[in-house]
């Protein structure tokens, strides 16, 4: 994954958004359980990697530079997605609610992406108005993403961990 493919950190995140949107569209069209399982696993991995680089690198770089409420809502939205990601990863196609969980996750992600990419007031628009070096941030995010992709291929990624929402045991 060459840095020249992404002009800055925001371009990297937007590319992730488009990839996940495409995976959700493929899932909607999939008919076989094997294909659904493969796509759901890929969606979950992509989202775990994306939320990790946002939460570890991107969001902290903008704390105090953009609206705190924008960042706070993003963390909570991530946690809602993480709960579904873990549930989907633990399940299999054919189980009750499996397709519904993927559909709701897709809807949650669409909402989150809209809030980040909204012109003028969206998170990315706010970020562009700061003095943060988006190219240096991209480089840090790409390095971390490469680490996570290697981990996903070798040992697999751990369960997603909520950071803002308290998950109660059933």
Image: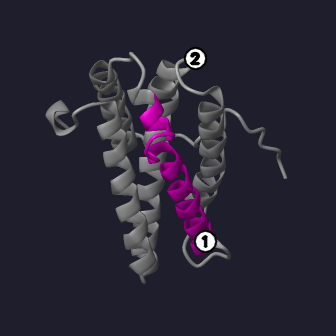
Task: Decide: is 66 above or below 84.
Answer: above
- Real-space Cα separation, disc 1 to disc 2, in angstroms: 39 Å
In depth, the one of 146 and 150 nearer the eye is 146
Task: Decide: is 47 above or below 29.
Answer: above
Task: Decide: is 136 above or below 32.
Answer: above
Q: Is residue 52 magenta?
A: no
Q: Quarter of the image holding residue 73? A: top right
Q: Are marks 1 and 2 in contact (CB under 8 Å)?
A: no
Residue 32: percent from left, percent from top = 42, 82
Secondary element under disc 2, as helix, strand or loop, is loop
Q: How many C-alpha atoms fall within 10 Å of the one at disc 2: few (<14), some, or many (≥20)?
A: few
Residue 138: percent from left, percent from top = 30, 27
Q: Quarter of the image holding residue 64? A: top right
Residue 161 visible to the viewer: no
Secondary element under disc 1, as helix, strand or loop, is helix
Q: Report the number of discs.
A: 2
| Residue position marked by numbered label 1 in the rendering | 98
Q: Is 39 placed left or right of 82 in the picture?
A: left
| Residue position marked by numbered label 2 in the rendering | 64
In depth, the one of 92 and 115 nearer the eye is 115
Q: Main secondary structure of the magenta part?
A: helix
In depth, the one of 3 and 157 nearer the eye is 3
Residue 132: percent from left, percent from top = 38, 17
Q: Which residues are magenta?
A: 98-126
């Amino acid at each position: 994954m060459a840095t020249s493919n992404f002009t800055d950190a925001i371009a990297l995140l937007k590319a992730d958004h488009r990839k996940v949107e495409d995976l959700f569209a493929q899932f909607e069209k999939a008919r076989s359980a094997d294909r659904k399982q493969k796509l759901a696993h890929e969606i979950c991995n992509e989202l775990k990697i994306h939320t990790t680089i946002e939460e570890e690198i991107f969001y902290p770089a903008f704390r105090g530079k953009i609206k705190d409420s924008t960042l706070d809502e993003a963390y909570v939205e991530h946690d809602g997605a993480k709960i579904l990601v873990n549930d989907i990863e633990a399940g299999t196609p054919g189980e009750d609610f499996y397709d519904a969980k993927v559909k709701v996750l897709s809807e949650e992600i669409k909402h989150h992406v809209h809030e980040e990419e909204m012109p003028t007031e969206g998170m990315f628009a706010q970020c562009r108005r700061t003095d943060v070096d988006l190219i240096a941030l991209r480089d840090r995010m790409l390095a971390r993403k490469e680490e996570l992709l290697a981990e996903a291929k070798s040992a697999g990624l751990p369960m997603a961990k909520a950071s803002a929402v308290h998950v109660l045991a059933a």
